[in-house]
Image: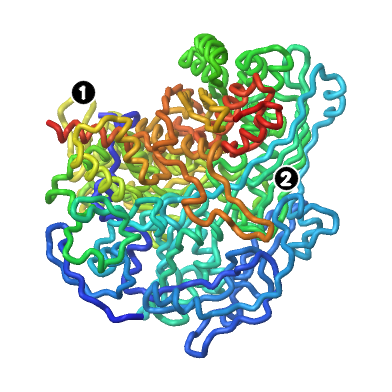
Amino acid sequence: MSERQNVTFTVNGEKRVIRVEPRRSLADALREDCGLTGTHLGCEHGVCGACTVLLDDQPVRSCLMFAVQAEGTRVRTVEGLADGDKLHPLQQAFWDHHGLQCGFCTPGFLMLAVSILELDPDIAEPELREALSSNLCRCTGYQNILKSVLAAAAEMRK
Amino acid sequence: MRWVGRPLPRYEDPVLLQGRGRYTADLAQGARILRFVRSPVARGRILAVNAPPEVPIVTVAVLGDVKPICPRLDRPDYVAVAQPILARDRVTYVGEPIAAVIADTAAEAEDLAEQVTVEIEAETPVVTLDQALAPGAPLVHDMAAENTLIDARFETSDVAAAFAAAHQVVEFTFTSGRQAAAPLEARGAVAAFDPATGRVTLSASTQMPHLLRTGIADALGIPESELRVIAPEVGGGFGQKMALIPEYVVAVWAARHFACTVAWIEDRLENLTASFHARDQRLHLRGAYDADGRLLAIDTDVLCNVGAYSNFPATCGVEPLMALADMPGPYQVPEYRARARGVASNTCPMAPYRGVSRPVITAVVERLMDCAAARLGLDALEIRRRNLTSDFPHTSVTGVVQDPGSYREAMEAAARVVDIAQFRARQKTARAEGRWLGLGISVFAERTGPGTPAFEARRMVINPGFERVELVMDPSGFLEARIGSSPHGQGLKTSLAQLIADEIGIAPAEIRVVAGDTDRCPYGWGTFASRSLVIAGGACKLAAATLRERLQAVASQILEAAASDIEISDGRAFVRGTDLGVEMRQLARATYHQSHRFPAIAETGLSTVATYDPYGTFSNACHVAIVAVDIATGQVEIERFVVVEDAGRLINPMIVEGQIHGGVAQGIANALYEKVVYDDGGNISTGSLADYLVPTMAEIPKLEIHHLETLTEASVTGAKGVGEGGTIGAPAAVLNAVSDALAPFGVGIFEMPITPQRILQLLREAGCETQ
């Protein structure tokens, strides 16, 4: 095992310095070194997307990145989505439209959807379907995830 | 204000949406990490387990007198086999835990586990049904001759005569691939030893917290009171998280032995290879019909590859016995013969998975109906009309009583929604253009909420039938509902709060449903068999009715009116027809603090307990799939998927539809995508989600849902269970649709999943040049 290294990055707007082994994944660093357990690990091989966070506004699988690769970046996780007590429009839409059941995949889907809508607020349904097919959900059959994201997109365009 | 029937947003959600939900792995901060060393071979004799001196390992010898897991059925046709907590001298499947190591971090635990070497004298494994049943096959367990762990039979008196008199006999063999439940959250446990009390608190991703406590306490030989089991947020279970597993026993043992907090967080490889599988079945079926298309008899031989051990408590009988009892489904059949076997192999054990056998038997019976219709020159609707049960209650040929449902009505409604005549015209045009469309129907009855009579009929030694609920109103008028059931993500707390709210006359926001904690909740059986809303919901209603009577009694005294004149609604008790009333919080406070005024309820106060244990009820549905099959690639595209569901009274229609959505998606996955693949050596080739193909949003079409509501007296709330129906009905609809699409080539589908490769192969075998 090699020496631990410092990683300095911004998480949900807050500057953080953590000291981690080079082999530490970004997901583990967020969960264990930053105490942000909202980012979930469903497969740890980059397929399910439950661990999706935004790194400099790009969606990444935090299980496939080393924490040291996040040096100097800006990371956003599900914990940073709401504005105090006010839910992000995507969170609100998932609540209103039953876009979650067990909730395990939800943080990953929310962060994925944030990145999609930030990039293209007017994204058409077929493209949205394609983009959201990056992540896996086992409970919802995706029906209400799509409905929720479409509703949030409409709300965010207002 | 009434709450039942509203699509109320779930109380569970805000915390989950903000990433504040606590799943088991989130509780592992600061815990020592347990890692299992697992068998790399499917069958063999352990010669040695070696580790460097600095790596302390836990083996079965270290565990001492920890007892094995030995699930039982009270049946002479069942062989009980014991699963050691860690492999003793033999390994029986790839992934079987042999030893465990403990370290301060997960990474270090993995490092340590890699330093452990296991010497195994490998033997040729039995992997498939054919290998396990071959004459002279090696035995997985010495006491189970012919590798048969259960061999159940049923036969009415005149089966042979029915076949002799038949106008048509349809016969085929159907193969169902092995599936994994694949909850997004794998399993896990955090066992925390409390040095002050000597107790261990086990937080585990489980569907059955109370029985988990019983099972672990029995294995360790400790009183149950020394163990508290908590099911925190559970990230899906689908049956996989029902069973007692060796890993949890080791975690609790280690917490006690090392007097610390120990966590085991299953990784995806472990989950896909060494948790539980399901649906690995082969069925031979004969169906006898008269000239009018009436089903005279079914004769079936069901073989289930149940893997290396029997799961606790459902046992490896769960699939074969479900197939045996429920095969005829929604159809009337006077004569029935079935043999259903559970066959051991050197593969991962089988456990209940959403639908349990019924996705397979529904596919089989629905394929039978379509094949018979083709022979008899009837259409798919007509043959079903002639055979569906319509007089209720109906006692099935196996003695199962089906309460009122809408088997025919659901099918007719679905047929109207999709407009079959219009589809047939479109199909004809498409065929002329070389495009292959198909329509498939699936009608089924889903037994939900089975109580103790159902499990008694299966001769289960542990009968998980009843549910108990305790309601306690506190002095502030806030209600706590402590339930023995234990949700795994389905929104049960919201649905139960709606039921209780209406029964008492308060808002669901004034109700906290407490579940998944053996210290806080009455003994109950958790969530499985589409039972939680039916049985825990029924208990909630009964307990709430009693509590309402108490509140009415207190209010009648405060308001000086007859109890029969007291109404409670919107959190206020009042004298009917007047504005004389009292708020719930005043009423509750008076009950606690001035109990001298209410001697009649002094003993029980505002606490009630109720137990509900129904016979069970049947939901029913009709699924219709329209598919397009590309004969050049073998790809199946689902153009349309319609569900007409009858789940009785809808408590929360949004949650009900969510259950159907998720169920259908898993059923489509079963029909088209997911298969656990073993090689000849018993190694799994599908150990990642890149190989085991859980469908994404790109594969699951828009699902159209319509409801019928048959109000049954078989459930005190009128609600029928709906957890499994989607999964049960969808495969048959898809397989019938693909068969319909490929009918011009003479290809019928008798297997699942039906992958593009298999479709191309079947087309080639039928003499069709696909390229």
The picture places residue A36, in percent across and down from the top left corner, at 24, 61
- Marking on residue B577: 1
- Depth check, front residue: B304 or A158: A158
The subunit letter for the residue under badge 2 reads: B
Position of residue B392 in the picture relative to residue B202 (left or right): right
Q: Which one is in front in this view, the residue at disc 1 or the one at disc 2?
A: 2
| Distance between the alpha carbons at the discs numbered 1 and 2 | 65 Å
The subunit letter for the residue under badge 1 reads: B
The picture places residue B49, in percent across and down from the top left corner, at 61, 81
The residue where tag 2 is placed is: B303
- Depth check, front residue: B725 or B180: B180
Quadrant location of the C terminus of chain B in the rendered image: top right
The picture places residue B695, in percent across and down from the top left corner, at 45, 41
Are circles 1 and 2 on residues that touch, CB within 8 Å? no
Residue at the spot 30% in from the left edge and 30% down from the top edge: A125
Quadrant location of the N terminus of chain B in the rendered image: top left
Position of residue B450 in the picture relative to residue B595 (left or right): right
Q: Quadrant of residue B96?
A: bottom right
Mark 2 secondary-structure assignment: strand
Tag 1: residue type? Gly
Mark 2: few, some, or many residues within 10 Å (few <14, many ≥20)? many
Tag 2: residue type? Leu
Residue at the spot 56% in from the left edge and 76% down from the top edge: B99
The picture places residue B212, in percent across and down from the top left corner, at 50, 61
Above or below: residue B12 compared with residue A152? below
- Figure coloring: rainbow
Position of residue B52 in the picture relative to residue A103 (left or right): right
- Depth check, front residue: B184 or B597: B184
